[in-house]
Image: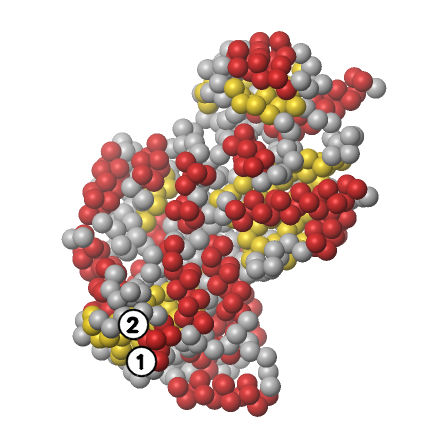
């Protein structure tokens, strides 16, 4: 019995570490996919959740093996889960260049936490989602491992079709929600939220009931739902996805993992959140472009693009492809671009060795947009 | 525009219908008589584009710049608020060049003042702000919003509200609606070059939560005798093009249908990335260009695979239907 519980818990630990980003099949709710513009580590997302009173496993963060050991002792937990903090998924099945297998480990012994952390920190972890040399692990999360008796799925997102926030949930959590949507659509529940009224008590209770929480757990889950919505608004999220929102044998409702997508347009009023942005796993050209407020996305061709306007920039990539070429990048300079930005954009493009064709070749500029751009160049 | 607005209001009063946002669709059709004010009048963008607007011949009658009320700018009066500006000028429309942190509030101010048409140029308004704006918008029928994150609306030769280059437009027969700014100018330039010209061009913008969608504009175009053909420019993200296709199936079929030509940008866009526009993202397998193209084609829309062929394609349609 103990053995199977342990292996179940281990499996759950792994699953929470590798929880895939879920894509819902139903056309009604458009899910955002996992490539985030703003990159937060798991511990950063969980810290935001904690600050909003959302129930997460107790955890500490460590940058050295001795810190990890101390943290494990301080936790004073029955069982500890140690998780390497990288942005890419697939951590559970990853491999370190120290030889250690697995980016997530469960143990009851704090000393083991220290030993394992020693083989994680400063080493590269390679998973299915990392580049082939892996990603250097600089931080680990030391958390209290909790058993899960039941897993549910819960998300809040800004939905265009509903003109605002929508809650979506399913009692079938911990698995591919897309499969659930396809095979058992009656197990997907939604509540449209009025942006001015917020989540009403009856909505939260109904969603909690639909998620399968009964008795005192229903109230607890409803409370967690409201707190998640508060977080959603507070950080200007476009989506908060909790999978699993779980039930423990001790009768707790806990958010075991969450993926938060943030609205870039809100950066000016979310400075703390955006300051946590970890760009070390991003493409260096895209990082440089972001510095200059350039909307740049690297593609794999050799014809560079330098365009005013997002629609036109997309169309430029399309027309290159239509004529048998391959665009090297998407770049929207925008209509209000300044001289310095234009210069930096040009530097970025010409620095890339893969451009064998002059970047000035397909550069559709419209007379109109040039006029506007020129005038702003003087500013 | 004033006659159709009056009629719409009378109709609402007579039928006792609830205020419904779609009632404000007619406000999209600006004319040489439309009186426009500018919010953010004395800022850099506001000043530049207001001067351009005046040069084009639009009836710019004043502007709003809190704290600068009573002054004159570009020869026009400055007011402290939209309400004061409307009272002082009788404005029918406002164009907003206010930075993202304050633009949502600027739109709400215009709705509160009952301005019939609000055009918000600003890019970068937080989505939550626009959700709140939309909540207000949908529960009233006096004010119509275009945008945000859009180039504006132009009735060539009569009135230009926004940042589009006036000189490429030519009074004519094609209604153009688009989510993109500079890509629209391609369609405009091409239709001018083939001699068809434009009746009304509306840029609905690239944000996921906005004031006017394709269907709003298609209704206006289908009901307008001056608009004989339509160009619809879409892009990845959301369902607007699919909804438009459904609408066209219902309202633009059969003998009296108007030719519709379209281009959808982003066929080569990688999924999951925001392609410049906040609303241009293929999310969760939905919102791709291919599906939009197929939906539009099934509604009888001629979809061009190249943005360089919009003028020639609609010209061919006119030829086929002996409309030249």
- Tell me the quarter of the image containing the N terminus of chain B: bottom left
Q: Chain of mark 1?
A: B
Q: Is residue B271 visible?
A: no
Q: Quadrant of residue B306?
A: bottom left
What residue is shown with label 1?
B88
Q: What is the image's colouring?
A: secondary structure
Horizontal side of A293 relative to B139 (left or right) equals: left
Q: Earlier in the sequence, mark 1 or mark 2?
A: 2
Badge 2 crowding class, 10 Å Cα cut-off, few under 14, some 14 to 19, many 20 or more, is many
The residue drawn where x is 79% and y is 17% is A3
What residue is shown with label 2?
B79
Q: Is label 2 in a helix, a strand or a loop?
A: strand
Horizontal side of A48 relative to A131 (left or right) equals: right
Q: Quadrant of residue B207?
A: bottom left
Q: Is label 1 in a helix, a strand or a loop?
A: helix
Percent x, y for residue B120? Answer: 37, 65
- Disc number placed over residue A123 in the picture, else none: none
The residue drawn where x is 31% and y is 69% is B80
Position of residue B146 relative to residue B256, above or below, is: above
Q: Are marks 1 and 2 in contact (CB under 8 Å)?
A: yes
């Amino acid at each position: 019995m103990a053995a199977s519980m342990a292996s179940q818990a281990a499996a759950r630990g792994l699953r929470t570490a590798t929880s895939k980003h879920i894509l819902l099949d139903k056309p009604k709710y458009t899910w955002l996919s996992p490539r985030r513009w703003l990159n937060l580590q798991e511990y950063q997302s969980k810290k935001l959740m904690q600050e909003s009173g959302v129930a997460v496993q107790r955890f500490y963060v460590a940058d050295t093996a001795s810190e990890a050991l101390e943290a494990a002792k301080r936790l004073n937990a029955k069982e500890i889960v140690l998780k390497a903090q990288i942005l890419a998924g697939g951590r559970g099945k990853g491999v370190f260049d120290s030889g250690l297998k697995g980016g997530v480990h469960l143990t009851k012994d704090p000393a083991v936490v220290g030993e394992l952390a020693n083989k994680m920190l400063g080493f590269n972890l390679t998973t299915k989602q990392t580049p082939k040399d892996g990603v250097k692990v600089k931080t680990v999360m030391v958390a209290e491992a909790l058993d899960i008796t039941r897993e549910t799925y819960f998300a809040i997102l800004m939905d265009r079709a509903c003109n605002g926030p929508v809650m979506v949930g399913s009692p079938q959590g911990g698995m591919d929600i897309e499969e659930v949507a396809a095979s058992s659509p009656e197990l997907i529940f939604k509540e449209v939220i009025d942006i001015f009224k917020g989540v009403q008590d009856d909505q939260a209770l109904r969603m909690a009931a639909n998620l399968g929480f009964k008795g005192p757990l229903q109230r607890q889950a409803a409370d967690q739902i409201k707190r998640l919505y508060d977080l959603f608004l507070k950080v200007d999220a476009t989506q908060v996805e909790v999978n699993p929102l779980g039930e423990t044998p001790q009768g707790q409702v806990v958010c075991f993992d969450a993926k938060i997508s943030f609205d870039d347009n809100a950066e000016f009023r979310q400075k703390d959140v955006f300051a946590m942005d970890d760009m070390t796993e991003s493409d260096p050209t895209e990082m440089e472009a972001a510095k200059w407020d350039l909307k740049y996305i690297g593609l794999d061709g050799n014809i560079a693009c330098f365009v005013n306007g997002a629609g036109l920039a997309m169309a430029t990539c399309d027309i290159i492809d239509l004529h048998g070429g391959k665009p090297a990048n998407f770049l929207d300079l925008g209509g209000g671009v300044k001289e310095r930005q234009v210069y930096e954009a040009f530097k970025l493009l010409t620095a890339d060795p893969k451009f064998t064709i002059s970047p000035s070749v397909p550069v559709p500029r419209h007379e109109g947009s040039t006029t506007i751009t020129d005038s702003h160049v003087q500013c | 525009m004033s006659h159709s607005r009056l009629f719409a209001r009378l109709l609402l009063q007579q039928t006792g219908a609830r205020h419904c946002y779609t009632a404000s669709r007619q406000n999209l059709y600006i004319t040489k008589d439309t009186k426009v004010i500018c919010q953010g009048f004395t800022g850099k963008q506001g000043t530049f584009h207001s001067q351009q607007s005046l040069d084009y011949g639009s009836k710019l009658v004043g502007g709003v710049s809190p704290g600068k009320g009573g002054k004159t700018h570009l020869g026009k009066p400055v007011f402290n608020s939209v309400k004061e500006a409307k009272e002082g000028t009788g404005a029918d429309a406002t164009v907003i060049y206010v930075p993202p942190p304050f633009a949502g509030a600027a739109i709400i101010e215009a709705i509160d003042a009952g301005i019939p048409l609000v055009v918000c140029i600003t890019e970068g308004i937080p989505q939550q702000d626009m959700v709140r704006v939309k909540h207000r918008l949908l529960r009233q029928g006096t004010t119509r919003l275009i945008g945000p994150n859009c180039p504006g609306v132009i009735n060539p030769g009569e009135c230009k509200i926004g940042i589009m280059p006036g000189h490429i437009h030519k009074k004519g027969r094609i209604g153009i609606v688009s989510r993109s700014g500079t890509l629209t100018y391609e369609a405009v330039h091409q239709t001018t070059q083939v001699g068809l010209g434009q009746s009304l061009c509306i840029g609905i913008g690239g944000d996921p939560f906005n004031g006017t969608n394709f269907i709003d504009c298609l209704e206006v175009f289908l009901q307008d005798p001056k608009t004989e053909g339509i160009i619809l420019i879409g892009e990845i993200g959301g369902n607007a093009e699919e909804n438009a296709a459904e609408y066209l199936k219902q309202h633009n079929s059969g003998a009296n249908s108007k030719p519709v030509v379209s281009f959808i940008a982003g066929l080569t866009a990688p999924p999951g990335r925001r392609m410049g526009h906040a609303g241009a993202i293929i999310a969760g397998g939905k919102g791709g260009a291919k599906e939009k193209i197929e939906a539009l084609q099934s509604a009888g829309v001629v979809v061009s695979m190249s943005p360089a062929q919009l003028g020639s394609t609609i010209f061919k349609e006119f030829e086929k239907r002996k409309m030249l």
